[in-house]
Amino acid sequence: MGKNNTKILIAALVMVVTAAMMIEEAKSIPICNVNTNDLKKCSPAVTGNNPPPPTPQCCAVAKTANLECLCPYFTRSGIDSAKIKTLGANCGITKKPSCLP
């Protein structure tokens, strides 16, 4: 492959990767002061039988989110409310939403 062909291939690859990243970000929907893609950062901390503690990135999302607004999503998600309460406690969130006992 010639030098020009290599440059064209690299430029095309960069454009494809950039477009893919833009499409992925476009799929994120803002709800309750947080983007849905950001909520995925907390998924490991609230799923499974013995979830790990939340990451600092998850805690930043949880502290930014309007947890009261997220109540309908909590109940529909099927996530155990005890795990959501544990996440809040581990992130230093003292105000619990009304949907969590």
Image: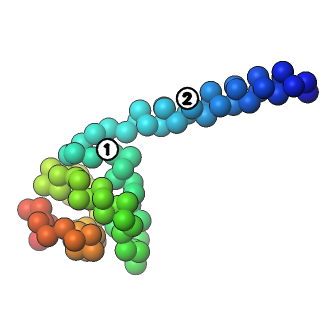
Give residue 19's mark.
2
* 40 w.r.t. 96: above or below: above
Residue located at (49% from left, 32% from top): 22
Task: Kindly state the secondary structure of the residue where label 1 is placed.
Answer: strand
Residue 7 falls in which quadrant of the image? top right
Front position in the image: 46 or 37: 37
Residue 47 falls in which quadrant of the image? bottom left
Q: Is residue 82 visible?
A: no
Contact? badges 1 and 2 (CB < 8 Å): no
Residue 99 location in percent, x, y? 12, 62
Residue located at (65% from left, 31% from top): 14
Which residue is farthest right?
1
Give residue 35's mark.
1
Front position in the image: 16 or 84: 16
- Relative placement, left or right, of 30 versus 19 is left
Q: Earlier in the sequence, mark 1 or mark 2?
A: 2
Picture quarter with the C terminus: bottom left
Picture quarter with the N terminus: top right
- Relative placement, left or right, of 2 versus 96 is right
Q: Residues within 10 Å of mark 1 (few under 14, many from 20)?
A: some
Which residue is farthest front?
3
Residue located at (22% from left, 52% from top): 65
